Amino acid sequence: MNGDDLADRLRDDHETAFSRLGSSKALYALTGGEMEAASVRAAAAADQHAVADLLDDWAMAEHGDAAPVFADLAEETRDHAESLEPDGYEPRDDPDLYDRLAFEDETPGRVGGLVGRYLVVSEYVGQMVGFFIGDADPKAADEFRTLRSAVEDERDRVIDLLDEVCEGDDDWDAAGEAADAVVEAAYEDYVETLESMGVKPKNVC
């Protein structure tokens, strides 16, 4: 087992969830039905702020190889968040997947959970790029393409970090369980949000 194997297994095991989390309806859920540029930017900023705050906490609690990576990622994601904030941005509640991520208190689970988070957010950001292309805003589309590239680079660093922090089967099991739980939390949030808005998620592909 290595980090790439775990990421591939996640994509295979949660194929339906990722398909739906990468759909326009996922963006509809993230923005609370407000499919406007400011709402898309606010949703992206809220996500980046949430992971930055969590990574800051983890960086202070860790003492091994993960600590400097968490600290670097916290700085990078906070920079993303601040650059994405629309005029009049107000902090939002953290997405549910971060409540699940915060549950992890051991390094393999934290890193594995982050892999799940990055795979989910890669889907979200892809939809955001498409939104701004459709909105005929090439400048914003390019900005979100840059964000997508940054998210993919950060994802690859976290996948590599798994190989450093997982030393045996128990560690890999913990990482995999955390990653599964984070993806499931994101998908459950998607379903519950759409249902609360009168949309039937099972009909969404």
Image: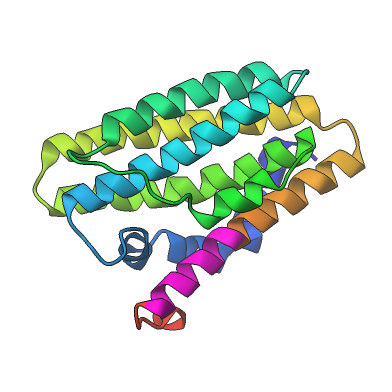
| Image side of residue 51 versus residue 109, left or right | left
Q: Is residue 190 visible?
A: yes
Kindly indicate the quadrant of the structure image that contains residue 10.
bottom right
Considering every residue shown, the one lying at the far left of the view is: 136
Kindly indicate the quadrant of the structure image that contains residue 78.
top left
| Image side of residue 152 versus residue 140, left or right | right
In magenta stretch: residue 182 = no
Q: Position of residue 128 (x, y in %)?
A: 29, 49
Q: How many marks?
A: 0
Label the magenta part by its dominant secondary structure: helix
User: Which residue is found at the position 54% from the left and 18% from the top?
Assistant: 72
Q: Is residue 9 visible?
A: no
Q: Position of residue 193 (x, y in %)?
A: 43, 70
Q: Nearer the viewer, residue 32 or 113?
A: 32
| Quadrant of image for the C terminus | bottom left
User: Which residue is found at the position 69% from the left and 27% from the top?
Assistant: 161
Q: Position of residue 76 (x, y in %)?
A: 45, 23
In magenta stretch: residue 194 = yes
Residue 30 lies, with reference to residue 179, above or below; the image says: below
Q: Position of residue 98 (x, y in %)?
A: 57, 48
Residue 188 lies, with reference to residue 148, above or below; the image says: below
User: Which residue is found at the position 52% from the left and 25% from the top?
Assistant: 74
Q: Nearer the viewer, residue 19 or 114?
A: 114
| Quadrant of image for the N terminus | top right
The magenta-colored residue range is 185-196
| Image side of residue 100 versus residue 140, left or right | right
